């Protein structure tokens, strides 16, 4: 053991161990090599025991050297073990017939509502809109007052709105997010606001107590109804097809003036009339209008300096139109037999 007492001995032991591990061709041989070098009665232990033969002042340095050596040998052992174990796994794989088809795994897909929302968002991103979101639980102030709803407006009624207390409610539309955004940002702005909204209605095929809405808001100097028409038409053609025509029907919302409901030529019959469009040739796709000056004042904008348009659409409704779904409650039901119909053939897309 005397030759182990110097640095040359340490180096020699390391290369001996390394070649022993490399030469081990299976886990049993490797284990034998491990016992030989790292075992309780192995070479390393012998080396440590020889510390007694050294003069006391050399012992600490020698101890450090042997400990480092032990770590290195352990490391090369672990490396070789990983290699040999992986080979075993590979052998197992090849034991079967590699030409057999793999087992099908069951995995999810994107919900049809999210697929539709994703497509709509990307169309508006292409037009330069950015996205913003806000709370589902809102103040009455942002949901109604700042949007120019009169105090006695019917939608403020308990019948239509889920109130948490006198001042707090579940938002009935995503517009309160735009009011909050205008308070913090100066024009020009171009935003879309998707989110869940809640209405205390008796559910039926076209009404649910919650649904997805997406609103848009564009504010700058000299924004006009023609700009609104342009963006809405571009959206309809991108989403439903290049032949879509768009028309505005006069309507009333407290937060826009003038206001309109927006129809598009039926994508199924191209306007000639069919069961999908109720034989009118037209489908309603959203509500829209020019932002009411009162709403600008509430948000801190000067209505003499700026104009803007806004629109709002029910994502559920758009999804129902595009995919021929006849009951909005299907979209909340999570019935996989129903939802699977809208996954892609490969079994769906990855979930965001
Ligand atoms: C609909 C109609 C609409 C808006 C939403 C809006 C927001 C602000 C100011 C003015 Cl901050 N207007 N939003 C405007 C017109 C229609 O939604 O039928 N949604 C499902």
Image (spheres, rainbow, N blue to C red):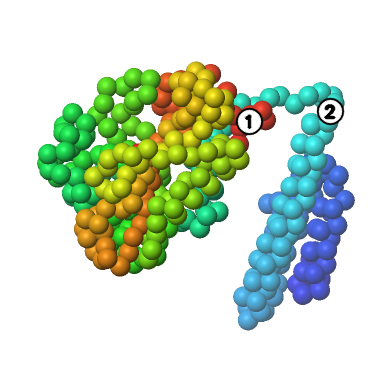
Residue depicted at x 64% and y 70%: 63
**193 vs 274: above or below:** below
Q: Earlier in the sequence, mark 2 or mark 1?
A: 2
Q: Which mark is residue 67?
A: none
Q: Quadrant of the N terminus?
A: bottom right
Residue 70 shown left or right of residue 191 in the figure: right
* Ligand 1 is within 8 Å of the C-beta of the residue at disc 2: no
Percent coordinates x, y for residue 91 in the rendering:
82, 34
What element does badge 2 sit on? loop
Residue underneath mark 1:
344
Residue depicted at x 16% and y 32%: 158
Q: Quadrant of residue 106?
A: top right
Quadrant for ligand 1 reads top left
Asked whether residue 33 appears in the rendered view, the answer is yes
State which mark lies toward you, 2 or 1: 1
Residue 127 shown left or right of residue 173 in the figure: right
- Viewer-side residue, 221 vs 343: 221
- Viewer-side residue, 232 vs 20: 232
Residue 159 shown left or right of residue 277 in the figure: left
CA distance for labels 2 and 1 = 28 Å
What element does badge 1 sit on? loop
Residue 346 shown left or right of residue 204 in the figure: right
């Amino acid at each position: 053991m005397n030759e182990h007492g110097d640095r040359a001995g340490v180096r020699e032991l390391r290369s001996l161990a390394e070649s022993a591990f490399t030469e081990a061709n299976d886990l049993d041989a490797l284990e034998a090599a491990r016992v030989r070098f790292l075992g309780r009665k192995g070479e390393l232990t012998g080396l440590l025991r020889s510390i007694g033969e050294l003069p006391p002042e050399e012992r600490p340095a020698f101890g450090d050297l042997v400990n480092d050596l032990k770590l290195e040998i352990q490391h090369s052992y672990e490396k070789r073990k990983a290699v040999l174990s992986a080979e075993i796994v590979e052998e197992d794989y090849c034991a079967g017939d590699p030409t057999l088809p793999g087992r099908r795994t069951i995995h999810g897909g994107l919900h049809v509502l999210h697929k539709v929302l994703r497509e709509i968002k990307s169309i508006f991103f292409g037009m330069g809109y950015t996205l913003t979101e806000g709370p589902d639980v809102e103040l009455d102030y942002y949901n109604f007052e700042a949007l120019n709803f009169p105090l006695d407006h019917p939608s403020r009624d308990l019948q239509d709105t889920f109130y948490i207390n006198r001042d707090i409610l579940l938002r009935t539309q995503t517009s309160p997010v735009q009011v909050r955004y205008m308070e913090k940002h100066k024009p020009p702005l171009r935003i879309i606001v998707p989110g869940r909204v809640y209405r205390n209605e008796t559910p039926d095929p076209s009404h649910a107590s919650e649904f997805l809405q997406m609103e848009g808001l564009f504010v700058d100097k000299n924004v006009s109804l023609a700009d609104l028409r342009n963006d809405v038409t571009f959206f309809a053609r991108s989403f439903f097809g290049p032949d879509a025509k768009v028309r505005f029907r006069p309507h009333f919302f407290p937060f826009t003036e003038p206001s309109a409901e927006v129809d598009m030529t039926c994508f199924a019959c191209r306007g000639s009339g069919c069961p999908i469009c109720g034989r009118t040739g037209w489908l309603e796709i959203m509500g829209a209008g020019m932002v009411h000056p009162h709403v600008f004042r509430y948000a801190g904008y000067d209505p003499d300096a700026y104009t803007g348009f806004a629109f709002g659409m029910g994502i559920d409704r758009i999804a129902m139109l595009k995919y021929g779904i006849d009951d909005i409650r299907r979209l909340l039901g999570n019935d996989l037999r129903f939802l699977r119909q809208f996954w892609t053939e490969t079994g769906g897309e990855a979930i965001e």
